[in-house]
Amino acid sequence: QIYNPQGKRRVLVTKKLVGDRWLRELENADCRVEVCESREILSNQQIAEAIGNRCDAVIGQLTEKWNDDLFGVLKKAGGVVYSNFAVGFDNIDIAAATKHGIPVGNTPGVLTEATAEMAVCLTYAAARHLLEANKYLVEGKYKSWLPDLFLGQQIYRKKLGVIGTGRIGSAYALSMVRGNLMDIVYYDKFTNKKMEQQLEQFNQYLKEIGEKPIEYKNAASMEQVIQEADIVSLHPNLDSSTYHLMNAERLQLMKPNAILVNCARGPIIDEAALVEHCKQNPGFAAGLDVFEHEPALAPGLKDLPNVVIVPHIASATFWTRSAMATIASLNIASILKGYPCWSSGDM
Ligand code: DGY
């Protein structure tokens, strides 16, 4: 699909985006926009072919591997900016982009609440066997109310564990703590002062209404979070230091009835180890939005009754996806107009 065929700058968009403001921003920057129709993951060769001989900028997807070769192709075609339709940027070789002198943009800020909401959804769904119970019902197995039918984990006043308290981790933490009066132990190399201030204000309110205050602390180690918490939600970026952060040893440290949530990136969990752990510990539960080898799932993962899985849709609200598209196009429009990347400094 080609928009604004008179536009002087050629911008390639590798997937159809959401909303229409993003397109207006590019058209206003005198761009001719070409959108790839395919809903399949494009190979680097297909992207290189779509870039062709002349391309000023690309809005690409987190499913694409933006490596040295691909940035080389973009540079050769006259490309001056690459904009990732995601806040995460583990699919991009930043050193290669820098080598080719191509600035890279991402979409921070606008998916914080949507992603935190999905982490909350997955926490409850995993704690209360939501999907398993739904399946039981629609399969016609519900014959009688029973005292022990689908007993789950109560969340109220339990201890929350959060690894990584950036924008999304802290939004999730505040929502869970305020909603369920939970103590919280988190791990982040920086103490999140803003989040702690909000927790302190919440404690003032709890005191006023005669409720016991909640406890909060930045733990000395990740292991402390994993061992103490009833729920552990993962929110770090994926890089070499967080790859397989939840491995077999750390899974073993979790409480046998704990809940593990991941809305960050799949490879943060060793998925084969998780499958084994869930088999050995039927009281344990996991809620996953992301997977190690997306879109493939580790053998056995989807058959586990104690695992709730959804296909990487944490940021999939209309508002968020159209805001992401707008930021992705503003990143390009800014560079083409000679300004810094719109989202610069926020990666
Ligand atoms: C991102 O933007 O990095 C998210 O994973 C998309 O939901």
Image (cartoon, helix red, strand yellow):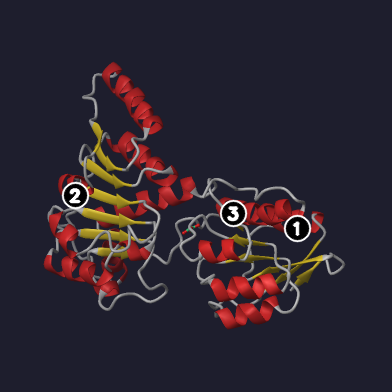
At a point 55% along the width and 47% down the height, the residue shown is 110
Mark 2 neighbour density, 10 Å: few (under 14) some (14–19) many (20 or more):
some
- Residue 194 in sight here: yes
Answer with the quarter of the image where residue 288 lies: bottom left
Q: Nearer the viewer, residue 34 or 95?
A: 95
- Left or right, residue 206 beside residue 100: left
- Left or right, residue 151 beside residue 197: left
For residue 218, the mark is none
Q: Nearer the viewer, residue 24 or 219?
A: 219
At a point 63% along the width and 79% down the height, the residue shown is 48
Identify the residue under disc 2: 223
From mark 2 to mark 1, how far is it between C-alphas?
Answer: 47 Å
Q: Position of residue 157 (x, y in %)?
A: 21, 37
Q: Amino acid at mark 2?
A: Glu
The nearer-to-camera label among 3 and 2 is 2
For residue 26, the mark is 1
Identify the residue under disc 3: 324
Q: Position of residue 8 (x, y in %)?
A: 84, 65
Given the current orientation, which residue lies at the most extreme right position?
6
For the residues labelled 3 and 2, say whether their Cβ atoms are less than 8 Å apart.
no
SS type, badge 2: helix
Mark nearer the N terminus (1 vs 3): 1
Q: Amino acid at mark 1?
A: Leu
Mark 1 neighbour density, 10 Å: few (under 14) some (14–19) many (20 or more):
many
* Above or below for 309 versus 171: below
From mark 1 to mark 3, how far is it between C-alphas?
Answer: 14 Å
Q: Amino acid at mark 3?
A: Met
Mark nearer the N terminus (2 vs 1): 1
Q: Position of residue 118 (x, y in %)?
A: 41, 53
Mark 3 residue CB less than 8 A from any atom of ligand 1: yes
